[in-house]
Image (cartoon, rainbow, N blue to C red):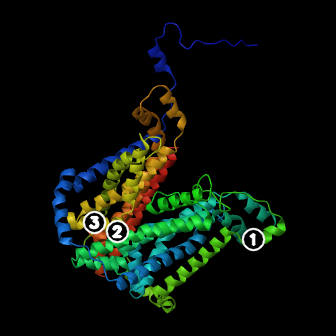
Amino acid sequence: MTAVTDRPLVRPGRSRAEVVAAAPRRRVRPERVAAGLTLVTLGVLACVALARIDVSVPNIIASWRNAQNFFQRVGVVRFPDAATLLQQTALTLGLVLLGTLLAAVLSVPVAYLAASNTSPGRAWVAAARFVSVLTRAVPDVVLAMVFVLLFTIGPLPGILAIGIHSVGMISKLFADAVEQIDEGPRTAIRATGGSRLQQFTAGVLPQVLPSWVATVLHRNDINLRGSVILGYVGIVGLGREMSFAFKSLDYSLGIGYAIVIFALCVLMEVVSSAVRAVMLGVAPSGRGLGTIAVRAGMRRRARRRGAPTAPQAGSRTTGRTGPAVRSHTPEQALRRPWTTARVRTTVWSWVAVLVVVGSVVVCDIAWGDLATVWAKVPPVAVQFWPPSAGSYGSQVMVAAMVDTVGIALAATLLALVGSMVVGSLAARNVAPTRSVRGAARLLLVAVRGVPETILAVVLIVVTGLGAQAGTLALAFGGIGLLGKLVADSLEEVQAGPERALTATGATRSQRYAAATLPQGMPAVVGHTFYLVDTNIRAATVLGIVGGGGIGYYLLNAAQGSDYGTVTGIVLMILVTVLAVEGIAVWIRRVSR
């Protein structure tokens, strides 16, 4: 037998400093060092881009005089007559709704093939995910330009552009929801000899339906905001009328259309949140104006009915007062009673059907064009190939793409700085008081409510054409998005380290710096890369309205029928987006 003796922690003759120096250290992997250097490099590039764009406090203060002159020129805000406003609003809502529904339908097979647990093989997964990335990378304005060539100017090109571009986001989220299901029901159906279709409809679809509906409603809100820019390439609706007003220097009418679009976005968010709460029995969990209003209404109804609390976000309710569960016999289960909840869901379902039918009627789609358009595809496709740099030259195109990336990085840097301040104050475990947290949350909601395109148009009028307006618009919108994500990430950290520091007498700032921020930083880095990816695409779009970058050349090439240049620009955008997404995936994997 070997006797086990306790070895002293500090051997005689050795100082404590020597013991600390000899203590085992965590080995730093080369991959983590490379990831850290990559983040530092991107930060330096963002600072350089910010300096080149010359976004500074003195310049912003100097632009205030231009803002005063602009609002003096606006004078009294004018709105279009009621008939025109009603027609254009209905047309905008109709094409946005139909485009989102088209994307939802197309996303189902793409998500089925992209999900690892339902796809027939890895090759299908790779192909489906490439389709998802490709449709996300190609701007909807480019798709709108193509469809305007194939069809006449009207709602149909806008519907198709919104639908195909939205497949990228919707199919990705659909696939993520499918991969997170409980495999038990699907395995049971497969064990009884069920086909793949039966496994999907009975074992997968019931589990993912709430998440899918929420995704579609959320994307519909995004598409409504994005429909503004489509008006600059000829798509009918409020966006086109606003672009006509600003191009004709009728600023009072342009601001009137901008206010209408903003109000419509808030109203759409309220309706989307209410539909999700009523049809699915799920309280909305977002931070927008609409979701906050719906949650407040649900809490008031719960108090009137005597319920202790309103339905929580993500919870399912089965009755009027709470998630009570009842047992039923098989015969009763086959004959579902017409409860109040079922009647309400049925009524809202039929209302949704009527809204879709009304949208089809309002848009007045020429269905015959869908059958005859195929003869136009070959000659139009020939115009887009081969890709070229046009009369500008490759150096000018590359420089413009670099400017676009610079705008995205500079806007992300500004948004990150603002989001860390506002988002931290909006976190429950960081804010010093409830009133401070409420004020920070309200600020984030207000910032997110303003579409970036409208803000960019106003800033361009104030500061002039160029990258400064686009950077400020993206930074302003980025604070609303990234600030909310930062707040949520900080609230989700483990409470143990924070409590331990509090027990030792640490101050609030010390607890934040030593426990809260280090735990939430990996999530913040991931969210920041998501914002970079989003800003690159948004910077391209804002360039069309004069925000600088490659979008300016994209619009000129389209208006000049130089479609080979359009293809070259789209390929540059695609390569850039894929590179950013690859870097983000690599850093998230290394940071685990």
Q: What element carries label 2?
A: helix
Dot placed on the residue nearer the N-terminal end, 3 or 1: 1
Comparing labels 3 and 1, the label whose residue is closer to the camera:
1
Label disc, if present, on residue 337 of the rendered structure: 1
Q: Are marks 1 and 2 in contact (CB under 8 Å)?
A: no
The alpha-carbon separation of the residues under discs 3 and 1 comes to: 57 Å
Q: Which of 463 and 590 is in front in this view?
A: 463
Q: Looking at the image, do the residues carrying marks 3 and 1 touch, with CB atoms under 8 Å apart?
A: no
x 28%, y 58%: residue: 472
Say what amino acid the circle numbered 2 marks: Val
Q: Mark 2 points at which residue?
A: 541
Q: Which amino acid does label 3 sit on?
A: Gly
Work out how far the residue at label 1 is from the one at label 2, CA to CA, in angstroms: 51 Å
Three-letter residue code for mark 1? Pro
Residue drawn where x is 31% and y is 54% of the image? 410
Residue 82 appears anywhere in the view: yes
Badge 3 local density, few (<14 within 10 Å), some, or many (20+)?
Answer: many
Circle 3 residue: 547
Residue 374 shows which numbered tag? none
The mark nearer the N terminus, 1 or 2, is: 1
Foreground disc of the pair 1, 2? 1
Place residue 245 in its image quadrant: bottom left
Q: In this view, does 135 lie above or below 446?
A: below
Residue 83, image x and y in percent? 37, 85
